């Protein structure tokens, strides 16, 4: 089952203090003005995750997440909506929310 941008938005906004920003074509969700998740293109999310958790996400869900070279030094992963496992995306967003709300 494909994860949709609308589902991402509903889940992100269900987390305390998360607010939607960005544009219509590139919505983003923030907590305390810190990025949690952003729709980069119709099929790709950028999710902030702790570096300490990133490798385990990539290992457990190789079809869901990736790290392009431009993101290697950052606390981010890409999630590919056309092949993403919904629970994995929600887990990564929850990790991002936890990291960013501090």
Image (cartoon, helix red, strand yellow):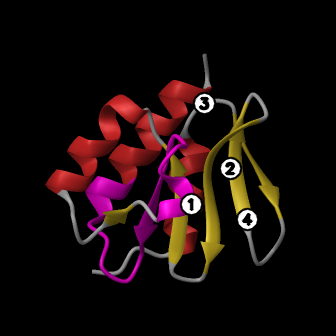
Query: Whole-percent x and y of residue 72?
Result: 47, 51
Mark 2 against mark 3, which lies toward the viewer? 2
Secondary structure of residue under mark 1: helix
Circle 4: is it few (<14), some (14-19), or many (20+) Cα within 10 Å? Answer: some
Query: Mark 1 or mark 3: which comes first in sequence?
Result: 3
Distance (Cα) linking label 2 and label 3 = 12 Å
Q: In this view, does 82 lie to the left or right of 28?
A: left
Mark 3 against mark 4, which lies toward the viewer? 4
Res 29 label:
2
Distance (Cα) linking label 1 and label 4 = 21 Å
Residue underneath mark 4: 27
Q: In this view, does 28 lie to the left or right of 74?
A: right
77 over 44 or under it: above or below: above
Asked whether 2 or 38 is in front, the reply is 38
Res 70 label:
1
Secondary structure of residue under mark 2: strand
Distance (Cα) linking label 1 and label 2 = 21 Å
Mark 1 against mark 3, which lies toward the viewer? 1
Query: Whole-percent x and y of residue 28?
Result: 71, 57
Residue plotted at (42% across, 65% down): 79
Could you tell me if the residues under marks 1 and 3 are in contact, i.e. CB atoms within 8 Å? no
Query: Mark 1 or mark 4: which comes first in sequence?
Result: 4
Circle 3: is it few (<14), some (14-19), or many (20+) Cα within 10 Å? Answer: few
Could you tell me if the residues under marks 4 and 2 are in contact, i.e. CB atoms within 8 Å? yes
Query: Whole-percent x and y of residue 97?
Result: 53, 34
76 over 53 or under it: above or below: below
Where does the magenta region start and end? 69-89
Residue underneath mark 3: 16
Mark 1 against mark 4, which lies toward the viewer? 1
Residue plotted at (56% across, 60% down): 70
Query: Mark 3 or mark 4: which comes first in sequence?
Result: 3
């Amino acid at each position: 089952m494909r994860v949709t941008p609308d589902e991402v938005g509903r889940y992100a906004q269900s987390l305390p203090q998360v607010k939607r920003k960005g544009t219509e074509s590139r919505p983003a969700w923030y907590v305390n003005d810190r990025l949690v998740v952003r729709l980069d293109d119709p099929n790709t999310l950028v999710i902030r995750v702790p570096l300490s958790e990133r490798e385990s996400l990539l290992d457990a869900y190789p079809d869901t997440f990736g790290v392009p070279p431009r993101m290697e030094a950052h606390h981010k992963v890409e999630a590919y909506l056309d092949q993403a496992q919904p629970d994995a995306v929600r887990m990564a967003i929850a990790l991002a929310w936890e990291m960013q709300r501090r």
